[in-house]
Amino acid sequence: MREMTVQQVQNYLNSTSLQPLLLDVREPWEYTICSLPNSQLIPMRTIPIALKELDPQQEIIVICRHGNRSRMVAHFLEQQGFKNVINMSGGMAAWAREIDPSMSTY
């Protein structure tokens, strides 16, 4: 599993032609407060049953509030055979603080 800071994720998303899956593993109530455009919500607790919806070959950037849940999910995905998984360090809290200060926080 790779780690990227929010600045690295933003730069990567702005420079790549093949957009990765932005997998948000927070709860629905958190996602409604703030989220990244084009992200897909699959709460952490439902990841095991949602595996069949995910492509193990696709690059996936896993997102949560601070980067802890996403790190656990990224590790789990790797154990399930996913090869290209990235954890967004600092999560949405860091994104709101460092990239988009106008973003709602909780």
Image (tube, rainbow, N blue to C red):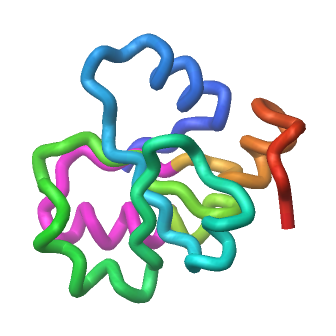
Image coordinates for residue 90, horizontal then vertical, percent: 70, 51
Give me the residue at 32% from left, 78% from top: 47
Which of the 4 image quarters holds residue 33? bottom right
**Which residue occupies 68% across, 63% down?**
65
Residue drawn at point x = 55 percent, y = 47 percent: 88
Q: Is residue 24 left or right of residue 5?
A: left
Left or right: residue 72 versus residue 10 is: left
Q: Position of residue 19 (x, y in %)?
A: 32, 29
Image height check: is 90 above or below 53?
above
Q: Is residue 46 above or below residue 105?
A: below
The quadrant in which residue 44 appears is bottom left
The residue lying at 61 percent from left, 66 percent from top is 31
Vertical relation: 5 (above or below) 12: below
Magenta residues, start to end: 71-87
- From the viewer's perspective, tell me whether residue 89 is left or right of residue 47: right
* Picture layout, residue 19 above or below residue 105: above
**Depth check, front residue: 86 or 64:** 64
The answer to whether 91 appears left or right of 8 in the picture is right
Q: Quadrant of the C terminus?
A: bottom right
Asked if the magenta segment contains residue 86, the reply would be yes
For residue 30: magenta? no
- The picture places residue 64, in percent across and down from the top left corner, at 59, 63
Residue farthest front in this picture: 32
For residue 36, which quarter of the picture?
top right
Determine the residue located farthest toward the top in the rendered image.
15
Question: How many numbered marks does the figure carry?
Answer: 0
